[in-house]
Image: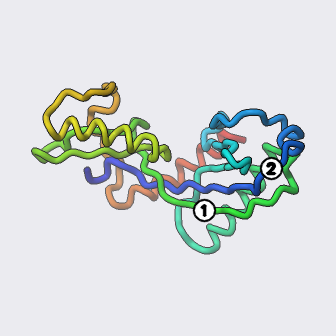
């Protein structure tokens, strides 16, 4: 599966539990996950304990200076989207890699050219839910059974390879720059 996925960073901040008055001030009434329409989108949701999770695409390199810049950026983006919460503390911050594919869909199936080998990847940051779903599909496929759950055609074909092989993450630099420009 060499070069068929792109590791990309995602950054998240989480507020302290918000009060009813704070939620009302921002007009937030739902626990439903949401995202904006940017190219490099933000995603957010109210958690069951009233903490608010806010995430965005991360950096290219994991270096102290880059981490500090992204911490400032995610906070600034949060405050721009939710000005009523400008003074709300965000005591939690983390980042991690997500797995992207060229067609922007997960892959679940047999590995081409490797009889008896199966894989599931490319969950684009939705790994908890999608990983469980893919695992169920893979359990049936490995046993050579028709999947008991829906197996979308878009997930069946192995994704194409990213250019540049092991250096493919370098392609994120111009891709992020173009998308950031489109977001302005």
- Image point (20%, 44%), residue name: 111
* Residue 124 position in % (x across, y down): 47, 44
- Image point (39%, 55%), residue name: 168
Q: Residue furthest left?
A: 115
As displayed, is residue 153 above or below residue 170? above
Binning the other alpha carbons within 10 Å of mark 1 as few (below 14), some (14 to 19) or many (20 upward) gives: few
Q: Are marks 1 and 2 in contact (CB under 8 Å)?
A: no
Q: Residue furthest front?
A: 49
Binning the other alpha carbons within 10 Å of mark 2 as few (below 14), some (14 to 19) or many (20 upward) gives: some
- Image point (72%, 41%), residue name: 184
Camera sees residue 16: yes
Camera sees residue 159: no
Query: Which one is in front, 173 or 84?
Result: 84
As displayed, is residue 164 above or below residue 159? below
In the picture of the structure, the residue carrying the numbered disc 1 is: 94
Closer to us: mark 1 or mark 2?
2
Query: Which one is in front, 46 or 162?
Result: 46
In the picture of the structure, the residue carrying the numbered disc 2 is: 18
Q: In the rendered structure, which disc, 1 or 2, sits on the residue that comes first in sequence?
A: 2
């Amino acid at each position: 599966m060499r070069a068929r996925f792109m590791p990309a960073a995602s950054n998240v901040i989480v507020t302290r539990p918000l009060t009813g008055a704070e939620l009302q001030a921002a007009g937030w009434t739902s626990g439903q996950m949401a995202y904006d329409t940017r190219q490099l989108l933000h995603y957010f949701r109210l958690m069951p304990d009233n903490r608010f999770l806010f995430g965005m695409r991360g950096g290219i390199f994991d270096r102290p200076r880059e981490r500090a810049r992204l911490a400032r950026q995610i906070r600034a983006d949060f405050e721009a989207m939710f000005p009523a919460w400008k003074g709300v503390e965000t005591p939690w911050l983390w980042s991690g890699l997500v797995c992207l594919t060229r067609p922007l869909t997960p892959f679940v199936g047999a590995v081409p050219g490797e009889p008896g080998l199966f894989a599931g990847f490319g969950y684009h940051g939705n790994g908890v839910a999608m990983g469980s779903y893919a695992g169920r599909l893979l359990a049936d496929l490995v046993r050579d059974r028709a999947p008991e759950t829906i197996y979308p055609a878009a997930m069946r074909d192995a994704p194409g390879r990213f250019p540049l092989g092991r250096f493919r993450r370098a392609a994120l630099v111009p891709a992020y720059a173009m998308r950031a420009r489109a977001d302005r």
